Amino acid sequence: SYELTQPLSVSVALGQTARITCGGNKIGSKNVHWYQQNPGQAPVVVIYRDSNRPSGIPERFSGSNSGNTATLTVSRAQAGDEADYYCQVWDSSTWVFGGGTKLTVL
Amino acid sequence: EVQLLESGGGLVQPGGSLRLSCAASEFTFSTFDMSWVRQAPGKGLEWVSIISSSGTSTYYADSVKGRFTISRDNSKNTLYLQMNSLRDGDTAVYFCAKRPLSEGYFDLWGRGTLVTVSS
């Protein structure tokens, strides 16, 4: 079964840029989606198909995907960006999530 | 308001059964594939199952295959998850989620319902 690997935590200074990675075998050949989840709430998609932002998601959120690593970039990080982030792909009729990364804004 | 609302969670003993429901509002429910995703306390997201818009195709995670059954009633705009032979490891918040047409992600989620399996 396909596996996605994320760092447990990433820290970023207020106003700086955070990058959260998602590793998987030839993940660059798949569509990667990213979700933000605040404590006690449902996930919200922030990036779909590698680099597309749904309406209402700030331009500060961007994504890329190549080789064995996909990356979610949060520019000009704000306190409100502090949350858990999950990458996700579709593989062989299953939906696979990464283990999640806690983003801390210092 | 476009929304999903889960219900049916609760405390159940190991080996027991439970049926979850997810009521959809303000969108054409019958058009979209629907899924269940769960999250154990303090853990990450785990996909559980998905059903096609018509209900004719279903897929399951290996961890629940043979024990859980996903179904839907498009006349009632409701998604279901029948959970049998429950184990301690099934304890989680269960979210229902909507899949956009021909996409590989979920664009609308419910708030979740907590299932606790314990003796």
Image (tube, coloured by chain):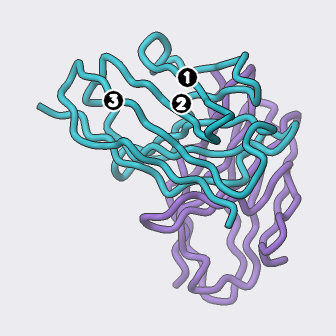
Q: Please say if A71 is above or below A3.
A: below
Using a 10 Å C-alpha cutoff, classify the residue at mark 1 as few (fewer than 14 neighbours), some (14 to 19) or many (20 or more).
some
Extreme residue toward the front, this view:
B75
Chain displayed in cyan: B
Chain to which mark 3 belongs: B
Q: CA distance from mark 2 to mark 1?
A: 5 Å
Using a 10 Å C-alpha cutoff, classify the residue at mark 2 as few (fewer than 14 neighbours), some (14 to 19) or many (20 or more).
many
Which residue, given by chain and number where applicable, does mark 2 sit on? B48
Which residue, given by chain and number where applicable, does mark 1 sit on? B61
Where residue A30 sits, quadrant-wise, is: top right
Disc 2 residue type?
Val
Chain to which mark 2 belongs: B
Q: In the visual, does B13 lie left or right of B29?
A: left
Q: Secondary structure at mark 1?
A: loop
Residue at 52% x, 74% y is A104
Q: Please say if B25 is above or below A53.
A: above
Q: In the visual, does A91 lie left or right of A54?
A: left
Which residue, given by chain and number where applicable, does mark 3 sit on? B18
Residue at 32% x, 41% y is B115
Q: CA distance from mark 3 to mark 2?
A: 15 Å
Do the dots labelled 3 and 2 sit on one chain?
yes
